[in-house]
Image (cartoon, grey):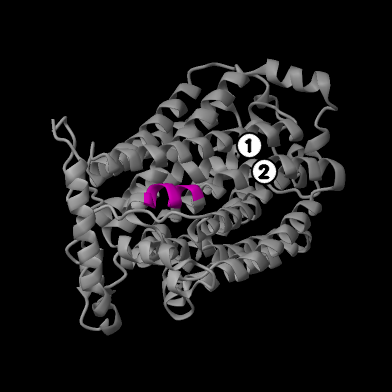
């Protein structure tokens, strides 16, 4: 059998033809995530220009004793501390609270999102969530000028609207993604997260330099509203609802993911006591810790320790997410290849990708602490740490969907609500650790904590995780009268395809 893993699942033949509607859906979700994460990260860059850091810590001599060459290089080519004279006198702890505020709302949105998805459908939940986030983004300069507490409240409310994203998209792909294309479709659509940060960071830097920090929120909010219009007309909740999908593509999708069955009442007790699912939640929390810590605090590290100016800062802060986008796409093709060719089982594939996406980032974070004051090597290590974390997008993240395809939105809502807590704690703890001086030694503690948590998350999923359909994923076909008529035909076509496949596969 040449070492291949034997799987009995039937591969439904793909229809031929022009561009597929599911690929249009990928593009629209990609664009939506791109805009959402642009709105989420814009404040991380803007705060560098908004806050008068010289009034808090960067004028302290403690900052120049460890790596004076970085400060000397900075001062030789720039006006000393020109960028540090911001409008607001907020210390690092307040900045940490502001950066983490969006996750307060994001966390509490997860479970209500599942109810809204059930009532209104994932299309409208996702679209309206991002649209209203854009509306609130327009108000950011006004809130900041009033009081930092108003800004925290606004960002928390914005997070409440953003928090419906993952549950809605997992629910959409539960209806749209054929099994053997799942890694590619889901990872490609979620890669908008990475490119959202790639594009937003340098754009924010340019806007701040040329039009002032408030322009960041007006420009990105406007582009997001344009996306929302396209989303309304080009997407649907299911293939059957789409206005211009071909019959061949609709039939292929429905047969591939078996839309002929309907889930029973959500088995909450079984879900919340499921060891594989609890392990997945823990892994989600741990990997989010490293991701969100760097997402929100990387521009501050670039400024405080490496001493890059705001344009260099924004450009270099974007580099990790270019690599992350590339790794996410590469990992999705590798994962689907391993499964389709049956080299690894689904669970083994998800565990392998999760291991890559947690152990490699941890390794590079540890290396940062031993390379001295070479800021360019530090940037390379950060790029590799953030970039390789994207292997996990084809790991536990898709494994959530595979544990129960029809309850994937609910599972994602639960897991993401717990995982988002790390987005609150991470920036806050960074603010506490770096509050006094913001030195390299303080940031070493930040990186060691993140690396340790990465390893714990990996161990949890390797030992207890699973990507197989769980016993509590019960189905009820008695209530699907119309679909029962189609089911014998579907089974007949699947058997014919399976027999054809057996005639062409050689076992050595």
Say left or right for 202 vs 343: right
Give the position of the C terminus as an image quadrant: top left
x 29%, y 66%: residue: 258
- Determine the main secondary structure of the stretch shown in magenta: helix
Q: Quadrant of residue 408?
A: bottom left
Q: Quadrant of residue 79?
A: top right
Q: In the image, is residue 362 part of the stretch drawn in magenta?
A: no
Residue at numbered disc 1:
318
Element type at mark 1: helix
Compared to residue 21, the image places residue 316 above or below, namely: above
Q: Position of residue 233 (x, y in %)?
A: 62, 70
Say left or right for 107 vs 46: left
Q: In the image, is residue 183 part of the stretch drawn in magenta?
A: yes
Mark 1 or mark 2, which is nearer to you? 2
Give the position of the N terminus as an image quadrant: top left
**Cα distance in 3D space between marks 1 and 2:** 7 Å
Residue at numbered disc 2:
199
- Contact (CB < 8 A) between labels 1 and 2? yes
x 17%, y 63%: residue: 471
Compared to residue 502, the image places residue 139 above or below, namely: below
Whether residue 39 is visible here, answered yes or no, is yes
Say few, some or many: other residues with alpha carbon within 10 Å of mark 1 (under 14 / 14 to 19 / 20 or more). Answer: many
Say left or right for 288 vs 88: left
Q: Quadrant of residue 505?
A: top left
Q: Which residues are magenta?
A: 181-188
Q: Position of residue 18 (x, y in %)?
A: 52, 55
x 45%, y 36%: residue: 330
């Amino acid at each position: 059998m040449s070492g291949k893993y034997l799987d009995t699942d039937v591969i439904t033949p793909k229809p031929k033809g022009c561009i597929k509607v599911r690929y249009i859906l990928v593009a629209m979700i990609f664009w939506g995530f791109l805009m959402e994460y642009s709105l989420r990260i814009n404040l991380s860059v803007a705060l560098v220009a908004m806050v008068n850091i010289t009034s808090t810590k960067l004028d302290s001599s403690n900052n120049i004793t460890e790596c004076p060459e970085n400060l000397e290089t900075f001062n030789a080519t720039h006006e000393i501390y020109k960028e540090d004279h911001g409008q607001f006198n907020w210390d690092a702890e307040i900045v940490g609270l502001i950066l983490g505020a969006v996750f307060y709302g994001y966390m509490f949105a997860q479970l209500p999102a599942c109810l809204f998805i059930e009532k209104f459908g994932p299309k409208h939940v996702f679209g309206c969530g991002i649209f209203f986030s854009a509306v609130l983004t327009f108000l950011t300069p006004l809130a900041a000028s009033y009081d930092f507490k108003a800004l925290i409240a606004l960002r928390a409310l914005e997070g409440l609207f953003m928090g419906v994203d993952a549950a809605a998209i997992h629910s959409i792909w539960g209806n749209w993604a054929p099994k053997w294309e799942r890694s590619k479709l889901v990872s490609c659509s979620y890669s908008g997260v990475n490119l959202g940060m790639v594009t937003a960071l340098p754009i924010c830097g340019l806007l701040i330099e040329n039009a002032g920090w408030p322009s960041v929120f007006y420009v990105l909010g406007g582009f997001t509203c344009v996306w929302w219009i396209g989303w309304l007309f080009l997407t649907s909740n299911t293939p059957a609802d789409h206005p211009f999908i071909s019959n061949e593509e609709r039939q292929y999708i429905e047969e591939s993911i078996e839309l002929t069955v309907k889930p029973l009442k959500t088995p909450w007790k079984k879900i919340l006591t499921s060891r594989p699912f609890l392990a997945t939640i823990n892994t989600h929390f741990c990997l989010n810790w490293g991701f969100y810590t760097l997402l929100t605090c990387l521009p501050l590290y670039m400024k405080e320790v490496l001493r890059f100016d705001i344009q260099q800062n924004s450009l270099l802060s974007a580099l990790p997410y270019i690599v992350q986008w590339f790794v996410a796409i590469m990992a999705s093709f590798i994962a689907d290849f391993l499964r389709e060719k049956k080299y690894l089982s689904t669970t083994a594939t998800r565990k392998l990708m999760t291991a890559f996406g947690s152990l490699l980032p941890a390794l590079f974070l540890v290396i940062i602490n031993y390379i001295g004051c070479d800021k360019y090597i530090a940037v390379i290590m950060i790029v590799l740490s953030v970039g390789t974390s994207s292997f996990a997008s084809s790991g536990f993240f898709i494994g959530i969907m595979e544990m129960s395809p029809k309850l994937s939105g609910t599972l994602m809502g639960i897991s993401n609500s717990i995982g988002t807590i790390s987005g609150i704690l991470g920036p806050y703890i960074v603010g506490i650790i770096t509050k006094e001086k913001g030195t390299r030694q303080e940031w070493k503690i930040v990186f060691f904590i993140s690396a340790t948590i990465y390893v714990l998350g990996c161990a949890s999923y390797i030992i207890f995780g699973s990507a197989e359909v769980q016993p509590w994923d019960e189905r009820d076909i008695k209530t699907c009268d119309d679909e029962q008529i189609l089911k014998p035909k579907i089974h007949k076509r699947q058997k014919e395809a399976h027999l054809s496949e057996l005639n062409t596969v050689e076992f050595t």
